[in-house]
Image (cartoon, helix red, strand yellow):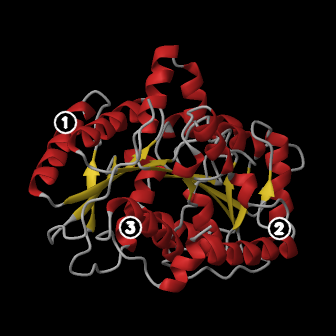
């Protein structure tokens, strides 16, 4: 049965309090890990009675089965934090598959301990995963989602799923759009004779449309004369390298492998266009990072993407699974300097208005203050807080 939001801790709570940010604290966590990492990076120096944000690893970086030991240690840390009186609350970041079950354990433990929870839903794939579950597990999932004080979602599609299918009251669901830091490197200056650099940044998988992208590069009429394509990310790198050789594009397609935050930032600063022809997404951080860097975005309009980007204005949309459409979209951006400059300019303006890290941290800070009590972390400033409110 749905329950009422947990009462926040008293304002007279002891000093040295903290809020756990629960997720896989390794790159295996993907975008969810990056969001959590950005939150901790973006927290300002706390006031004497304001808790700090701390990581709570719930998975580890090894095999999925080994993650249960990491989860057990996370639950032990929850108990210790509650017994010490220093744990103000837990911000749980959730995706689909095993993430749903691991984070459910965290939520249930917090419920038993009387610790308030904010649930942050990241994955667009949870909808399909939920619908494939047996009826008892669907009911169990709805019950778990009824426990947190608040559920944060990325956009209207996720909001409709959580309120409609998971039956969470709309008053306990809040849309908060992710934010990313300012660029760490200056953008390169391109000229008419410069090699055109296209970047794919993410896990190399069929869901991300990597095979479709490689096939797009051999479409009839596609101009590859000045093209350099970099695919940066983990996954089946060897398999896609073999496909690139088979298609004859290995001469200008480079596989950079997994790239940490700093390496990815350098690649983004050198790119003329980011391409992400995924079959499904939430709101990918890599797109927001491209907007921040003033890099033109070529992507598929899936998940929350079409609710925040506009074709021909802030991005160039292509159809997932359609190599010809991907080739046309890339050519459209690379061969039209005026369009590319417009996408770069409009994308940067959109980042400043909606996707800055300051704005994101302010929005999350408001949620923490409301549900974790007056000792919740302060937002950056009153102006940011007002802008962050919907």
Residue 153: percent from the left, percent from the top? 55, 50
Numbered tag placed on residue 369 in the rendering: 3
Residue neighbourhood size for the residue with mark 2, other residues' Cα within 10 Å, grouped as few (<14), some (14–19), many (≥20): some
* Residue located 14% across and 69% down the image: 14
The residues bearing labels 3 and 2 have C-alpha atoms spaced at a distance of 36 Å
Where is 288 relative to 134, above or below?
Answer: below
Can residue 134 be seen in the rendering of this structure?
no
Mark identifier at residue 72: 1
User: Distance from label 3 to label 1 (Cα)?
Assistant: 28 Å
Question: Dot 1, how many residues are within 10 Å of its Cα: few (below 14), some (14-19), or many (20+)?
Answer: some
In the image, taking residue 49 as reference, residue 195 lies left or right, namely right
Q: Element type at marker 2?
A: loop
Q: Nearer the viewer, mark 3 or mark 1?
A: 3
Which residue is under mark 2? 313
- Mark 3: few/some/many CA within 10 Å (<14, 14-19, 20+): some
Q: Compare residues 300 and 5 and report the one nearer the observer.
A: 5
Mark closer to the chain start, 2 or 1: 1
**Discs 3/2, front:** 3
């Amino acid at each position: 049965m749905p329950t009422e939001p947990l009462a926040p801790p008293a304002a007279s709570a002891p000093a040295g309090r903290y809020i756990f940010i629960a997720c896989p604290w390794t790159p295996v966590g993907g975008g969810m890990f990056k969001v959590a990492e950005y939150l901790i990076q973006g927290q300002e120096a706390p006031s004497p009675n304001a808790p700090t944000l701390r990581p709570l690893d719930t998975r580890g970086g090894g095999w999925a089965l080994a993650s249960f030991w990491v989860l057990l240690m996370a639950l032990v840390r929850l108990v210790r934090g509650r017994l010490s009186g220093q744990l103000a609350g837990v911000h749980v970041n959730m995706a689909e598959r095993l993430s749903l079950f691991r984070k459910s354990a965290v939520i249930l433990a917090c419920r038993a301990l009387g610790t308030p929870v904010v649930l942050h839903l990241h994955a667009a794939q949870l909808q399909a995963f939920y619908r494939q579950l047996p009826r008892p597990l669907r009911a169990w999932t709805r019950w778990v989602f009824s426990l947190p004080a608040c559920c944060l979602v990325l956009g209207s599609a996720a909001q409709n799923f959580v309120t409609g299918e998971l039956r969470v009251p709309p008053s306990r669901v809040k849309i908060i759009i992710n934010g990313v830091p300012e660029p760490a490197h200056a953008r390169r200056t391109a000229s008419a004779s410069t090699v055109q650099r296209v970047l794919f940044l993410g896990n190399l998988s069929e869901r991300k449309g990597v095979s479709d992208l490689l096939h797009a590069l051999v479409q009839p009429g596609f101009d590859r004369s000045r093209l350099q394509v970099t695919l940066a990310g983990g996954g089946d790198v060897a398999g896609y390298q073999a496909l690139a050789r088979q298609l004859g594009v290995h001469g200008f397609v480079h596989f950079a492998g997994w790239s940490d935050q700093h390496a990815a930032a350098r690649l983004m600063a050198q790119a003329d266009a980011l391409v992400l022809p995924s079959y499904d997404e939430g709101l990918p951080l890599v797109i927001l990072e491209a907007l921040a860097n003033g890099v033109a975005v070529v992507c598929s309009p899936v998940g929350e993407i079409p609710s925040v980007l506009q074709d021909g204005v802030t991005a160039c949309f292509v159809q997932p699974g359609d190599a010809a459409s991907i080739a046309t979209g890339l050519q459209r951006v690379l061969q039209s300097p005026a369009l590319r400059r417009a996408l770069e300019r409009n994308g940067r303006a959109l980042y400043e208005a909606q996707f800055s890290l300051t704005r994101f941290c302010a929005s999350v800070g408001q949620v923490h203050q409301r549900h974790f009590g007056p000792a919740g972390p302060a937002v950056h400033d009153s102006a940011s807080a007002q802008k962050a409110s919907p």
